[in-house]
Amino acid sequence: MIDKLLSTTPHKPGCYLMKDKNGCIIYVGKSKNLKNRLSSYFKQNHSGKTKMLVRDIVSFEYILTNSEVESLLLELNLIKKYTPKYNILYKDDKTYPYIELTNDRIPRLLIVRNPNIKRGGNRKLFGPYPNVSAARKVVEILNRLYPLRKCKNMGRKECLYYHIGECLGYCTNKINDEEINKMKEEIISFFSGNSDIVISKLEKKMYDSSEKLQFEKALEYKEILDYINITLEKQKVELDDNYDRDVIGYYEEDNYLSINILFIRGGKLLDKKSNIFPMIDTLSEEVNNYISNFYDKHTTKVKEVLIPSIVNGEILKDTFNLNFFTPVKATKKKILDLAMENAKNYYNEQISIIKKDDEKLNEALLELSNLLGIEKANHIEIFDNSNIFGSFNVSGMVVFIDGKKNTNLYRKFKITNDKNDDYGTMREVIYRRYFRVLKDNLDRPDLIIVDGGSGQVNIAREVLLELGMNIPVAGLKKDDKHSTNVLIGKYPLEEIEIKKDSYLFLLLTRMQDEVHRYTISYHKDIRSKGALSSILDNIDGIGEVRKKIILKKYKTIIKMKEASVEELSEIMPQNIAINFYKYLQNIES
């Protein structure tokens, strides 16, 4: 099959999609020469993750493009569409925050995670900040120095920020544009590398507080000054400009790739980001792919990105409209060398830990597959359910691949049947999930784990049988102390003891805790976001007519919570009033 496909593959640029035995796309790549690249997978010896990938490949298909730029854009889109497990496993999936100075007449300083959200023109974005704490600290300092608007929607009277001197009371006072524009200019100047104004303001506040014998306040300003001075000292780089730039270095050894990105803002080294992962593709492709994924995910308007010579800067430049180039001498070359050195140091610091962890995880997954009598357990999907008195019934699914969380594949399910019926919930969520897997030809897990006993396992198996899918299912049963006790699996079902001092027990506990955390978090989110009408929609026995009566009488959750069962019984049957009262006492106002 593979040889036949290779014989007709052309020596042209394009993207290729690797498929497993179920026809699911497990890896997407690109190449300027498809024939050579695809042949290298099947006619060379491999190790590590590449070996695992090749082992799972049964067939492939490809899409020809006119250029490498088209290939890159197509690859990014295909990865987003199919989320193949070998593409997203070891890539950086975090989004870093930015600091935004809003474009309102009376602006605010915000931490934003998604800079692509449209808020109008002339937005001022600074970042990204891999160190979230540092970003928050900067916003906190600037908000104390500059009395900008703090509230999202201005009220009718001054708030606490006005009374402590951190807001000018824009809701009641008329502030001229000149004063506001001056604050905006100074903040922008600070982010452009000019910290003198901010330091001067802090020093003045410190001395003023000291003269007024407000020594605690003076000490607080001194600590902020120390923070800024120490930070600026660490940020020094040998550049005599105030430009924003990123600098990317790498180091490769033993089929692992270490990447380091230095974030230079206003001519100062603001932060760095390091990552390490096993390689699947060639070194050049892995580095190019990492950079492509990073700038596809993170909006930035830096003046330039310094890259090593192994990176194809022209393709990246055309794709992301940023100035990518490789310096060959002087100061910029030294900074690129620094990024390369950081990548090597990070590799040396982390590789022994990573390899040891990978080894333990592999042993635990092998033990798990042996205990259950299945081929492998590299891709595991775990489910948990949550509800309160049958209301806001939800399920969560988390995914572990090679023993590590893959948050890109997590899924939430709002259950349509709002009854306290765990079996019904499990039936619905398993059907919805794996009908979608069939419909969209998604990657199938090696193992499904449900948080429950034999009843939950049997329900999941019945649904899979109805769908014509043969995926192993196991359960995690808890003891009286709500601690994981036994693994339930095999045919017929058995209770399999797991040694509590084993790494497998720790791994399964970690999985169980993660799916529980994720599901409870979603449940709380659903509850907190629910409007009054949606809350009432989730209570059995309350229809449209009764809902209108309740909303007209109580109007807010707080007023509803203050009502007694007797009062509620005046507008609904007593049994419904009792359930409604109990439900109200378990939600936050």
Image (cartoon, rainbow, N blue to C red):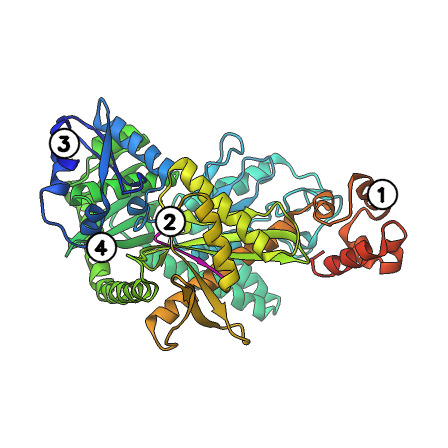
Query: Per the image, is 399 magenta?
Result: no
Q: Amino acid at mark 1?
A: Ile
Mark closest to the chain's N terminus, 1 or 4 = 4
Place of residue 166 in the rendered image (x, y in percent of width and height, measured from the top left): 62, 52
Q: Earlier in the sequence, mark 3 or mark 2?
A: 3
Residue at mark 4: 343
| Pair 1/4: label in front | 1
Residue position marked by numbered label 3 in the rendering: 4
Category of crowding for the residue at label 2, using alpha-carbon neighbours closer than 10 angstroms: few (below 14), some (14–19), many (at least 20)? few
> Which quadrant is the N terminus positioned in?
top left
* Residues tagged 1 and 2 counted as in contact (Cβ below 8 A): no
Alpha carbons under labels 1 and 4: distance apart:
65 Å
Q: Which mark is residue 470?
A: 2
* Quarter occupied by residue 524: bottom right
Q: Is residue 571 above or below residue 7?
A: below
The residue segment tinted magenta is 445-451
